[in-house]
Amino acid sequence: MIRSFVYIILFTLTALPALAGSLLIKVKDKQTDEWLANVSISVQQPNGSITPFITNGNGTVNVMDVVFPMVITCSNIGYNDQRIELTRKDVMTENGTDTYIFSLDKVSGKLNEVVVTGQALPVLAKQSIYKVNTLSIADFVQRGAVNLNDVLNYEMNNFINNDNVLGSSVTIGGIGGQNIKILVNGIPISGRENGNIDLGQLNMNNIKRVEMVQGPMSVMYGSNALGGVINLITQTSPKKFTFGIRTYLESIGRYNFSGNLSASRKNHQVQFSVARNFFQGWTPKDSLDRYQLWKPKTQYTSDLQYQYTLGKLKLNYFGSYIHEKITNKGIPIISPYEGYAFDEYYRTNRLIQALNPTYQINETDQISLVNSYTLYKRTKNRFKKDLVTLNQIETQSIGDQDTSVFKTLNLRGVYSSKRIKHLDLMLGYEYNRETGISFKLAEEEQMMTDIAGFASGLIRISKLSIQPSFRINHNNRYRTAITPALHTKYDITSSIQLRASYARGFRAPSLKEMYLQFVDQNHTILGNPDLKPEIGDHIELGLDHHFKAGRSNFTIGAVAYRNVISNMITLAVYNNHAVLRKYANIIAYKNWMFNLRGQWSYQNINLQVGGGYITVEKSSQFPQHHILEASFLSSWHIKPLKTSLNFNYKYNSQQPVVTIDQQFLFTAPLHIANVSLQRSFFKKTLQAQVGVKNLFNIQNTALVGSNAGTGGHTSSSGMQVFPARSLFFDLNYQF
């Protein structure tokens, strides 16, 4: 009888699930071995109870009192979900602790890329309520991009304007200047010249992704976001130690060198990058001369990023510095008595300091802060240089010597919650103070502040998502403004998304537009303190479809836009005076846009095509005109040669150009293209690329529409587009 009792006890013990005590779950990226934080883990015990967990900064979760077998579901944005039934034999022991490691695969396709711009928390692009266009490192390499204007050159609705002194600027759907907000990790970039951020000052060495949203984002990002937002996301290294160097050479006289270093240890991660970009200048003459049509430019840039993780707290510091010098050597003036020239030097310094803590209150609630201070300084010096002795003296004419300093403090905080089922709530505040100090400003110093609160609620009802949002903004020089928006998304199927939205934009005039007093030998430009704020209304309807056919992947997207901007601010001739200009409001700017895009990928071939049509309605400032554009981007990886062939092309029927003399002109049709070959060596640690830029050798374009006058940097006689066709070589080594 005792023996029977022992058999019964043994049978019962073997029939019951095995008690494992505690289990350490670790989650990493399958391709990079990076430990993944904020991964959702669901543990279902044999009794049916389900317990949710979130991995910490080290990608780990400690589950207590586990009983085998159990079902574990592991999910993270941008990765394929994993669901397994875990038994005791699947568990390994590390340092005396029962451990199981998940390796997650990233999902493929642009619709499945993770985006953060305008979001409370990172989401997949196809899940975003906004239409977010993303560009990755692969796109940068495919286009041979060195800076942001190289990246955006081939994007639909984008037109890049190059100025030899003021730099490169972008218009999106005919809207540019102060109405395009450019961010780095959500930190606003300040320091505009002629209303634009110089895209050539935004180097791509430390950028892993660019996210763009067209249309007013004023609810989320305030003033200067009426036309859209461009957000540059910096890289973070998942490995303990990485080191890389890059050399870029171009036959027109560009010689760039950059390096990056990153290291991580336990809860600490640091990344540092530095670059020197040199352009010796270029002129179409057969022999070199003092005067260069494309001005020589030297840039020094550096970025430092440090992240510390302590439990639910993540503290991130970001610092960035750029020093740029543009040299404009004048045409020699020779007489029997002397030889001299007038030379100009433009120096720009921009320093960004940002501290961004994030605290994960619990599984559903999070607080994120973005606090930044930016110092922007631009100096102009003009000299008369003796070409015999090489001595130079400062000239004393009006506007020859100038220093402008702008200081910007931006404080932003967001509380996000998923506590309520089917509702994502976001509440935020933003404080922005800009101080300008310059002889070109009235009273030499001016200040403007904005204080705002904003809120949005993302409601999910089955396949329908609705996000109403609003912003209350108080400007110290204007009345309080309320900016509403309503975005909707309907998932027709898991692969078809329909989006419709309305958004209102608001922009207060800048300090320069209100208080500028610019005078030189050729122009007098005055600010206008009586300017009214710009108000924009934006309607958008779009459809995206992602599907497979055999081994081919297809993405098709169509989107239509309608923009109406009241009180648009522009320079206007003042009292019919020949050289006097003053900022003024025009009645309205209205346009319609339609885009159609398609992408096809098959094994080692990737093709992207797009077409766009823009109609700008007639107004007091602009005649009615139409713009047609088309793009074709392709990449083919040739396996036997281990080489990729890239080709990019874009066509613009015309682009409107407004000169500083208020000439409304049009460019001739433009065809831009580049082609390149790229290959990896030594297990992909060394990347080499050789190619040709400006394949059709387009150097300038005639401007038509007026016969009178010339402008300061753009004239009715023509506009410089690119230097000559060039050969480039890019070598990138990552250790």
Image (cartoon, rainbow, N blue to C red):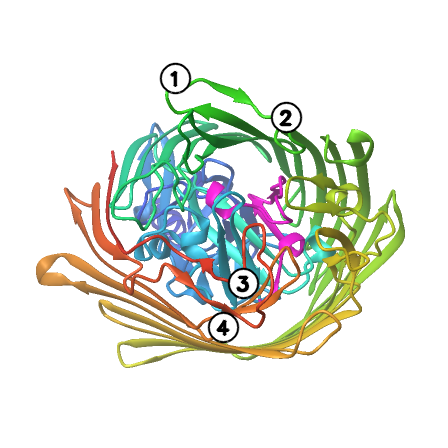
Residue that carries the numbered disc 1 in the rendered image: 389
Q: Tell us which disc is closer to us: 4 or 3.
A: 3
Q: What stretch is highlighted in magenta?
A: 173-202
Q: Which amino acid does label 1 sit on?
A: Thr
Residue 346: horizontal and vertical position, in percent?
Answer: 52, 33
The answer to which of marks 1 and 2 sits earlier in the sequence is 1
Q: Which amino acid does label 3 sit on?
A: Ser
The quarter of the picture where residue 335 lies is top left
**Whole-Å distance between the Cαs marked 1 and 3?**
38 Å
Residue that carries the numbered disc 4 in the rendered image: 654
Q: Quadrant of the C terminus?
A: top left
Q: Does the magenta stretch include residue 176?
A: yes
Q: Are marks 3 and 2 in contact (CB under 8 Å)?
A: no
Q: Do the residues labelled 1 and 2 touch (CB within 8 Å)?
A: no
Q: What residue type is labelled 4?
A: Gln
The answer to which of marks 4 and 3 sits earlier in the sequence is 4
Q: Do the residues labelled 4 and 3 touch (CB within 8 Å)?
A: no
Residue that carries the numbered disc 3 in the rendered image: 716
